[in-house]
Amino acid sequence: MKSILIAGVDLGTTKTCAVIAEVPQDPILRRKLNILGVGQARTVGMHEVITHIDETTESIRAALAEAELMAGAEVERVYVGIRGDHIKAMMSPGIVAVEDDEISRHDIERVHEVARAVAFPPDRELIHAIPQEYLVDGQRGIKDPLGMMGTRLEAELYLVTGSALAAENIRRSVHRAGYHVEDLILEPLAAARSVLTVDEKEVGVAVVEIGDATTNIAAYFDGEIRHLAVLPLGGVAVTNDLVQGLSIPFADAKKTKELLGVACSQLVDPKEMVDLPGLVGGQTRQVARELIAHVIEARMDELLVMAHAELEKEGLLSKLHAGIVLTGGASALQGINNLAQQVFAAPVRNGSPGEELAGIADSVARPRFSTAVGLVLHGFDRYKETGLGASNSSSGLIGKTRKWLREFF
């Protein structure tokens, strides 16, 4: 029996990550995805949007090739993340008359179609249309109206749009790499899918995904997405601060951040000294680790204060009873939870993928894989609902032919 595979690609600013997972033979009874392969490649030709299609294509090809090699199988379709400050969201209502006394699936599809019928400019593309609430004959708070009695059905949809050009360039890059884009998924929604629980979404929670160039925010309560935001600050800003503050090259600053970085200077012994590269090649010098922590803390505090202000502006802070979940590569910094608790005055935890996963799940159980894993979980959700959106594992002559075409075209 051929395996049913789902693949996700996270196009980060500095790193492209691919994850391949296998759908269990009975996805209803066996609810966990089997992680089969993980691949990473340095991202080239990508900032917040694609700036060089050929270079981005190579990054996608390299990451997926590594994941396929680990999985021992090839995929055709991939779910790809999209992000950036071009993303916009809005609420849109729809209303229809119920055709019969009982609300049918067709009635729900019609009210969704009405709510989606918004005249967007030609340079905008609808990425998500997420139901928020239904009303039946004026009664609010209905999650699923299917089968209910009524004469009038209303729906409120959360419409997420993005740059049509940015979306098309992602599709072109993936196509040139030899794959088909099954769907584009907004990255903060993907990250939230992999690190938040159903209960957290019900009582109110915000995921703060700290990436390289940006920080994405997705806030939930009553089980639905309520706010999305992109902040123009991420982990690279911390690395650049270390370059300036410590007078070391970017590569050394990144390594220093990952190995010695602390986001809360109170956790560092003021007497502790560490070795850093000297100003002359081959030499080293000693620096107080507390100095490194102060540099990191200043920038991370600014980032978290911006996230706090964004949630406060939308009137959401009082509704986030489950607090804040930090994820993304930069959230792995030691002491960041301590700093975030000071800023938000709320419960804070780190979010890593792990729930609903089997196979080599430990290989993706880190914050930097939250988006890529969330993409395959979105694909799994779609497959369970429709039976579509997955790949059959390729082998033999077909697989070899596809590999040859990728390498030469």
Image (cartoon, helix red, strand yellow):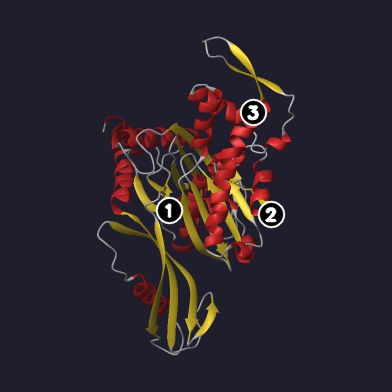
The crowd level at tag 2 (other Cα within 10 Å; few <14, some 14-19, many 20+) is some
Residue at figure coordinates x 59%, y 26% from the top left: 256
Q: Secondary structure at mark 3?
A: helix
Q: CA distance from mark 2 to mark 3?
A: 28 Å
Which is nearer the eye, 153 or 158? 158
* Gap between marks 2 and 1 measured at Cα: 28 Å
Q: Mark 2 near mark 1, Cβ–Cβ under 8 Å?
A: no
Rendering coords of residue 205 (x, y %): 61, 59
User: Picture quarter containing residue 130?
Assistant: bottom left
Place residue 58 in its image quadrant: top left
Q: Residues within 10 Å of mark 3 (few under 14, many from 20)?
A: some
- For marks 2 and 3, the one nearer the N-term is 3
Q: Is residue 9 above or below residue 121?
A: above
Secondary structure under the numbered disc 2 in the rendered image: loop
Residue behind mark 1: 185
- Label 2 sits on residue: 347
Residue at (41, 39) in percent of width and height: 74
Query: Which of the two residues, 11 or 48, is positioned nearer the viewer here?
Result: 48
- Is residue 204 something one can see in this rendering? no
Q: Select label 2 or label 1 by which is in front.
A: 2
Q: Is residue 321 left or right of residue 3?
A: right
Q: Could you tell me residue 194's position as x and y percent?
A: 56, 51
Q: Amino acid at mark 2?
A: Pro
For label 3, the residue is 291
Number of residue marks: 3
